[in-house]
Amino acid sequence: QVQLVESGGGLVQLGGSLRLSCAASGTIFRLYAMGWFRQAPGHQRELVAQITSDGTAVYADSVKGRFTISRDDAKNTVSLQMNSLKPDDTAVYYCNADVRPTPWVLPQGYWGQGTQVTVSS
């Protein structure tokens, strides 16, 4: 079993910053791409940022220049530094990771439980 646990969400004012963290635990042979998605009420879940095992990062156009994703493979964590937050960033943020639990199993996608980020104007 693999678990992803997010932390760091909360309420922040327009222009403020938050840092989200996600820790993967359980049976992990190898971590591949890790990322953050978000879902606002009435909207589909969308990719915010993703980082591959070699450190290549991609971002949604709406967050480029404001958000930075990073990972620490020694700790099996992925973080999202969010600056210059806007009300449109309000959503539940979900951690996602592609994990190979053992050498004999293909990589599978796992999700965290989500953490609420609310940006007030």
Image: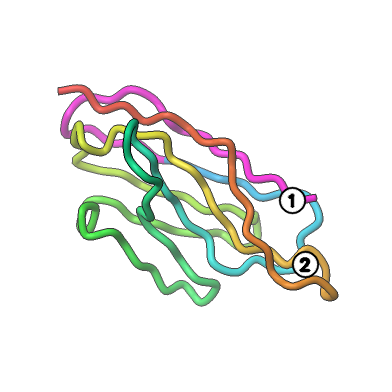
- The 10 Å Cα crowd at callout 2, few under 14, some 14 to 19, many 20 or more, is few
Q: Is residue 16 magenta?
A: yes
Position in image of residue 76 (x %, y %) = 64, 56
Q: Circle 1 sits in a helix, a strand or a loop, which is it?
A: strand
| Residue sitting at x 85%, y 75% | 104
User: At 25% across and 43% down in the image, what residue appears?
Assistant: 83
Number of labels in the image equals 2
Q: Which residue is drawn at 61% across and 39% down?
A: 5
Q: Do the residues labelled 2 and 1 touch (CB within 8 Å)?
A: no
Colour convention of the picture? rainbow
- In the drawing, what numbered circle is on residue 61? none
Q: Which of marks 2 and 1 is nearer the N terminus?
A: 1
Whether 48 is drawn above or below 88: the answer is below
Image side of residue 40 versus residue 23, left or right: left
Neighbour tally class for label 1: few under 14, some 14-19, many 20 plus, Cα within 10 Å = some
Q: Measured from the top left, where is residue 42 in percent x and y?
A: 32, 34
As measured in the structure, the alpha-carbon distance from the residue carrying label 2 to the one carrying label 1 is 10 Å
**Residue at label 1?**
2
State left or right for residue 60 relative to residue 107.
Answer: left
Q: In this view, does 79 lie above or below 85?
A: below
What residue sits right under mark 2 in the picture?
29
Q: Is residue 80 shown above or below 30?
A: above
Residue at 55 percent of width and 72 percent of height: 53
Pair 2/1: label in front: 1
- Three-letter amino acid code of the residue under disc 2: Phe
Q: Where is residue 47 in the image (x, y as percent from the top left)?
A: 38, 55
Q: Residue 40: which quarter of the image?
A: top left
Magenta span: predominant SS is strand
Specify start and end residues of the magenta stretch as a single range: 1-19
Give x and y (percent) for residue 121: 14, 23
- Assess whether residue 59 is covered by the magenta stretch: no
